[in-house]
Image (cartoon, grey):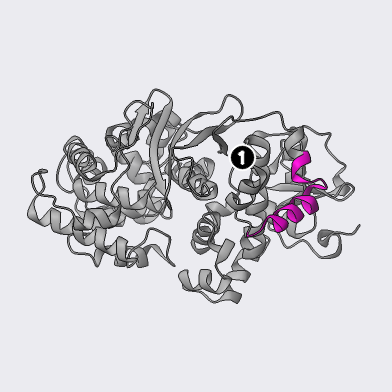
Amino acid sequence: MKHALDMDPVPYPLDQDACYRAIMAKDARFDGRFFVCVSTTGIYCRPVCPARVPKRQHCTFVPSAAAAEAAGFRSCLRCRPETAPGTPAWSGTAATVSRALRLIEEGALDEGRLEDLAARLGLGERQLRRLFLAHVGAGPQAVAANRRLLTAKQLISDTAMPLAEVAFAAGYQSLRRFNDAILNAYGVAPGEIRRASEKQAGGSIRIRLGYRPPFDFDSVLGYLSSRALPGVESVTAGRYARSFNLGGVKGLITVAPAATGRALDARIVTLDTKAGRVPVRAIAARLRRLFDLDAEPGAIAAAFADDPLIGPRLARAPGLRVPGAFDGFELAVRAVLGQQISVKGATTIAGRIVNRLGEKVSTEEPGITHFFPAPRALARADLSGLGLTGGRIATLKSLAQAVASGALDFTPRESLEAKLAELTALPGIGEWTAHYVALRALGEPDAFPASDLGLRKAAGKGEPVSTRELERMAESWRPWRGYAALALWTI
């Protein structure tokens, strides 16, 4: 059988010989950065696959699993590409492609059209396809199909979900399409893969979330701990837990380091037996953003290596990540509450809002007592007596109403500037709040709240520099200004 890679010149910007040396060494640092397509077997693998390394003439290297699938190769059942860390296309390439990939990961093309995705990014369809082929090696629809396939494979292998539920959780619109996709990709039916799997997660759904080391998980937890929403989130030693209510599906999520490998182990438990389909892909995408799992720490460290202010800080804290947010609306509310008051004060008021307006939840998880209030409930609520000023109440209600009406969402736009303009159009939300929301809720790596007093003090080594001076200094930190901000805040 001839594959696309056998017939056409390879359009991928990879050093093929260097990639082969990496798989010869089975160097885990390259896991997720590229995949190897083996012409003699028709299989594609991760660089760390335990199988014997094929001969060089039988190997072609591509930047993404989607590119391998598009070329006609099947996913390896031994090294399981669906468990690899995010590919380099998630960070370090064109910002538009990265934003599009985040939307695809959340299911933008499962039901929506490519035309609609392109419009959300401010592009035409043809332009978006050209960008994807240049950076990912496959078109947007091929990437979406690949994500559905790999999500389905992971759920078949790692959970006890009924196969019909797996199909819809992975984004397939029918059971027939799901069965055909698995059979074409793996040569066996979904039931045979399930029977061969030794991993069952009982009544919960288990997701393995890979990352590229180094990764300072404890540092992320420490940051989240002081800002955790009382009653909604709980952070303990080496473990994160929270309630969620997505599309009417209510449940509990816990996250901890996986027992083996470079990954986090997330478990999802639904709290309503009559709930609809669990949005597994959306939850996985939110968790990846929350823990910044798609960061490329090597590239970030290299970008700051010669910087006298940021370089030494990153050298002392390898694996620094920008803690994100599971829910953009929650983070935006938390950001408004934090305007000009302490972290502890904002957390206290957030707990009062949750206790007054949040729906109660019954769970054995310590510290989890409520779901966060929905935007519509917050927009209509009486917020007096909670320690909020009149101006802050007006801002919260305006924010909640914008989200409830659909005028504001927390999905990426065509540029950071476009999202900042969208946020600052709301009364009471200035540049600082907008950058903070973009940094944590949207995962924008170049967001930078330059007016922050803490940043200005750190940049001036105790004596605050002006906002304009800090912005000038930060120009050399693009496109990683968000990581510079975190380094200045925390190290």
- The structure residue drawn at horizontal position 11% and vertical position 47%, both measured from the top left corner, is 388
Locate residue 351: give its quadrant. top left
> Count of labels shown?
1
- The structure residue drawn at horizontal position 27% and vertical position 57%, both measured from the top left corner, is 376
Q: Position of residue 287 (x, y in %)?
A: 47, 43
Rendered view: 201 above or below 138: above
- The structure residue drawn at horizontal position 55% and vertical position 32%, both measured from the top left corner, is 203
Q: Position of residue 12 (x, y in %)?
A: 70, 59
- The structure residue drawn at horizontal position 80% and vertical position 54%, both measured from the top left corner, is 184
The front one of 13 and 8 is: 8
Q: Position of residue 357 (x, y in %)?
A: 22, 45
Which residue position holds label 1?
Answer: 161
For this view, does 156 lie left or right of residue 361?
Answer: right
**Amino acid type of the residue tagged 1 in the rendering:** Met
For this view, does 239 lie left or right of residue 164?
Answer: left
Q: Would you say residue 136 is visible in this rendering?
A: no
The front one of 362 and 100 is: 362
Query: Is residue 181 found inside the magenta-colored segment of the image?
Result: yes
Q: Position of residue 358 (x, y in %)?
A: 26, 43
Q: Residues within 10 Å of mark 1 (few under 14, many from 20)?
A: many
For this view, does 463 lie left or right of residue 447?
Answer: left
Query: Magenta stretch?
Result: 173-192
Q: Would you say residue 133 is visible in this rendering?
A: yes
Q: Mark 1: which secondary structure? A: loop
Give the position of the C terminus as an image quadrant. Answer: top left
Rendered view: 119 above or below 245: below
Rendered view: 118 above or below 296: below
What secondary structure characterizes most of the magenta part?
Answer: helix
Rendered view: 142 above or below 169: below
Give the position of the N terminus as an image quadrant. Answer: bottom right
The front one of 165 and 9 is: 165
